[in-house]
């Protein structure tokens, strides 16, 4: 899951980097047979750029919370579904919170 998150963050950075080249694309200053032209066009237009990649990344980010937990001397991030996505997970977390409250 962490590798998938890293990959999605890399895609986000890539699309942001390509924004300056997209203005060239809009001005039709790119060779239509060139590699850069292919990179700046979505798959549905015969290019290599995943269609709607930013919305896919945002959708994923809205499904997962990265909770920081102690893992010995360092902090570890673990993925958890947003509340309301998985009822069973929510009930288990609520029970854990109840037990913690009882112990305090």
Image (cartoon, rainbow, N blue to C red):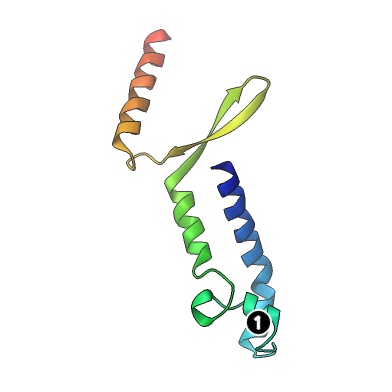
Point 69% across, 90% down: residue: 29
In the drawing, does residue 9 fall left or right of residue 96?
Answer: right
Count of marks placed on residues: 1
Q: Residue at x 67, y 25 (%)?
A: 74
At horizontal 54% and vertical 81% (from top left) the residue drawn is 46
Q: Quadrant of the C terminus?
A: top left
Q: Dot 1, crowdedness within 10 Å: few (<14), some or many (≥20)?
A: many
Residue 11, picture quadrant: bottom right
- Pinpoint residue 21: horizontal percent, then vertical percent: 68, 77
Up-down relation of residue 74 to residue 23 (above or below): above
State the residue at coordinates (61%, 49%): 6
Residue 93: % across, % down = 37, 27
Image height check: is 28 above or below 53?
A: below
Residue 18's x, y, as percent? 67, 71
Q: Nearer the viewer, residue 82 or 36?
A: 36
Q: Quadrant of residue 27?
A: bottom right
Residue 16: image quadrant is bottom right
Residue 68's place in the image compared with 18, above or below, is above
Residue that carries the numbered disc 1 in the rendered image? 37
Report whether 95 appears left or right of 70. Answer: left
- Whether residue 36 sits left or right of residue 8 in the image: it is right
At mark 1, the secondary structure is helix
Foreground residue among 4 and 15: 4
Residue that lies at the very extreme toward the top in this rendered image: 103
């Amino acid at each position: 899951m962490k590798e998938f998150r890293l990959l999605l963050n890399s895609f986000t950075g890539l699309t942001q980097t390509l924004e300056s080249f997209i203005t060239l694309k809009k001005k039709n200053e790119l060779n239509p047979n060139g590699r850069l032209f292919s990179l700046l066009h979505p798959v549905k237009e015969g290019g290599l750029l995943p269609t709607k990649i930013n919305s896919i990344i945002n959708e994923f980010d809205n499904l997962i919370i990265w909770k920081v937990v102690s893992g010995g001397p360092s902090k570890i991030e673990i993925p958890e579904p947003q509340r309301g996505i998985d009822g069973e997970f929510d009930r288990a977390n609520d029970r854990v919170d109840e037990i913690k409250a009882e112990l305090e």
